[in-house]
Image (cartoon, rainbow, N blue to C red):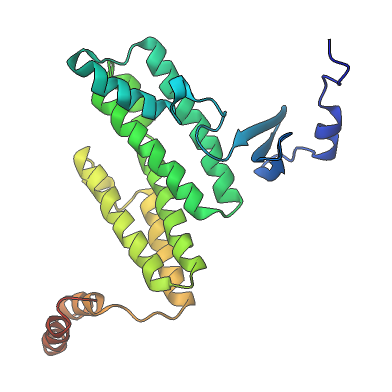
Amino acid sequence: MSDSPQHFDHLLVNWPFTMGQVLVRQAQGADGRDVLQVRVDLGILQLERTGRPDGVKPEGFDTYYDYLTSLAFDEGDTFELDEERCNEVDREFYQFYHRRICWLTLKMYPEAVKDAQHTLKLMDFSSAYTPDPEWALLHEQYRPFVMFHKIQAAALTELEKTDPQAAAGAIDKGLQELAEVFEKHNASEHYDDDVFVAKLREMRSSILEHYEVEPSLAEQLAEAIAAEQYELAAELRDRLDHRGGEN
């Protein structure tokens, strides 16, 4: 038996848990590699920064999703998500959720975008090959939440480059993608009332107001038409045509 202590007493005492706060830090492993740590109520979670958060390489692949896509290619029409595979998919969803929250808390937005994209791809795969629609729905119901994180992180990535127009564009693109999700599920009537849509619209308005960004020509044209200012609309349309349709 090792003489090294088996308890975490010193770690927990030096990093107390605070209810209602997301406590994340970067640390180094024994080999000097950088890792992420999350303080939870009953201990500390440690996550790898690349690949799967638990550091496992399923059958040599970086993630279980990568392994599954390889299996689906090899097995063809005989491929199926059995109970064991579904359980592993659940694990990977959970692990990437924890790391995405870490990235957002640490304001490491490109990494948050990447992990959100992985989760969405795994969600697509699960829905396509699900043996049980209710199982797939357990994950699919969180798609707007994951998309919200991705869109938010993409916009904040652009803001770090001091490009508010690109940030607003990232939100516009994300809102369109969200609208398509609502339409796919025959829920378009709930789109405008969705909390994530409202938060993204508020974020977009705050960015444009804070950076004093003028509305694009396309937005000015839409406003002019809505206000029945047809002479102004014609002028704006000419300017858009002159620019080749660019905003």
**Which residue occupies the foreground of this view, 5 or 170?**
5
In the displayed structure image, the side of residue 124 where residue 228 appears, left or right? left
Q: Position of residue 121 (x, y in %)?
A: 34, 36
Percent across and percent down for residue 158 are 44, 65
Query: From the viewer's perspective, is residue 200 above or below residue 87?
Result: below
Residue 205 vertical placement versus 9 (above, below)? below
From the viewer's perspective, tell me whether residue 111 is left or right of residue 21.
left
Q: Position of residue 44 (x, y in %)?
A: 71, 31
Asked whether residue 21 appears in the rendered view, the answer is: no
* Quadrant, the N terminus: top right
Picture quadrant of residue 243: bottom left
As drawn, 200 above or below 207: above
Answer with left or right where residue 89 lies relative to residue 160.
left
The residue under the point 42% across, 57% down is 154
Q: Quadrant of the C terminus?
A: bottom left
Task: Please report the residue visible at 67 percent of the width from the left and 44 percent of the height from the top.
Answer: 24
**Residue at 20% over, 44% down:** 183
Q: Residue at x 30, y 53 (%)?
A: 192
- Residue 205 placement, left or right of 2: left
Residue 50 in the image: above or below residue 103: above
* Residue 135 visible within the image: yes
Position of residue 99 measured from the top left corner of the image (x, y, whole percent): 55, 39
Question: Looking at the image, how many numbered discs can be counted on the residues?
Answer: 0
